[in-house]
């Protein structure tokens, strides 16, 4: 249900206008995500429940961004799904890139400070995916100069990440190779 309603615009009723986090669809999605995480936690490990919760949080926030763009284009929209104009909007893709990058960098810094290598790796994967999407898909129709500047900025971002939040060392059990007898 969570994934099905992710692309719905939903009606803001009983509110007169769209208000993020108070939209009935977002309240439903938040409750659905909480139930899913609780269900996974009861049957599997805490680590898997946290991973699922983190992925669902990213999806929920990305859906909020899409609905913000949908209702900013047509505040009184009665459409069931998010408008196709949103998916074609350069502003939406830029906002999604900024959000994904900040979400990934937050994970990188948290993983470094808490010395949690899986959190750091998840943040690195999300940041690289966001930069890859920007460079390959979003800038596909742009000129050479814009692509060069984007590559340069992406390199600076990755350099900053390497300096501010390097990968934490592996746990002691992984770091030492087994003794050969």
Image (cartoon, grey):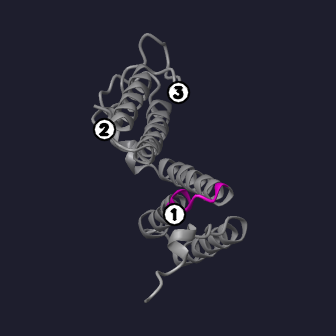
Decide whether residue 119 is among the magenta residues.
yes
Left or right: 167, with 69 as reference point: right
Q: Are marks 2 and 1 in contact (CB under 8 Å)?
A: no
Q: Which residues are magenta?
A: 114-121
Q: According to the image, label 1 marks what residue?
A: 121
Q: Is residue 73 above or below residue 136?
A: above
Which is nearer the eye, 142 or 18? 18
Residue 162: quadrant of the picture? bottom right
Task: Residue at 57%, 50% (x, y): give it.
Answer: 103
Q: Are marks 1 and 3 in contact (CB under 8 Å)?
A: no
Which mark is nearer the camera, 2 or 3? 2
Instruction: Give how far apart the Cα atoms at labels 1 and 3 are.
Output: 30 Å
Instruction: Give how far apart the Cα atoms at labels 2 and 1 are.
Output: 25 Å
Q: According to the image, label 3 marks what residue?
A: 20
Neighbours of disc 1 within 10 Å: few (<14), some (14-19), many (20+): some
Decide whether residue 123 is among the magenta residues.
no
Left or right: 44, with 50 as reference point: left
Q: Look at the image and tell me in which quarter the N terminus lies.
A: top left
Which mark is nearer the camera, 2 or 1? 1
Left or right: 176, with 41 as reference point: right
What SS does tag 2 mark? loop
Task: Residue at 44%, 40% (x, y): give it.
Answer: 53
Q: Is residue 18 above or below residue 111?
A: above
Predominant SS of the magenta segment: helix
What SS does tag 1 mark? helix
Q: In the image as oriented, which residue stretches furthest toward the top?
A: 14
x%, y% of residue 12? 43, 18
Q: Look at the image and tell me in which quarter the C terminus lies.
A: bottom left
x%, y% of residue 152? 63, 75
Residue 3: assigned label: 2
Which is nearer the eye, 40 or 162? 40
């Amino acid at each position: 249900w969570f994934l099905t309603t992710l692309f719905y615009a939903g009606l803001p009723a009983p509110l007169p206008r769209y208000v993020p986090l108070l939209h009935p669809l977002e309240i439903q999605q938040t409750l659905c995500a909480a139930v899913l995480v609780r269900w996974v936690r009861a049957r599997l490990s805490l680590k898997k429940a946290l991973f699922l919760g983190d992925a669902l949080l990213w999806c929920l926030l990305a859906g909020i961004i899409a609905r913000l763009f949908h209702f900013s284009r047509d505040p009184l929209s009665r459409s069931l799904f998010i408008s196709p104009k949103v998916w074609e909007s350069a502003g939406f893709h830029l906002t999604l890139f900024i959000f994904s990058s900040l979400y990934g960098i937050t994970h990188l810094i948290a993983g470094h400070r808490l010395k949690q290598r899986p959190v750091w790796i998840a943040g690195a994967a999300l940041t690289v995916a966001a930069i890859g999407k920007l460079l390959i898909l979003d800038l596909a129709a742009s000129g050479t100069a814009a692509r060069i500047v984007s590559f340069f900025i992406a390199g600076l971002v990755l350099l900053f990440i390497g300096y501010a939040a390097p990968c934490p060392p592996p746990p002691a059990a992984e770091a030492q190779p087994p003794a050969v007898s």
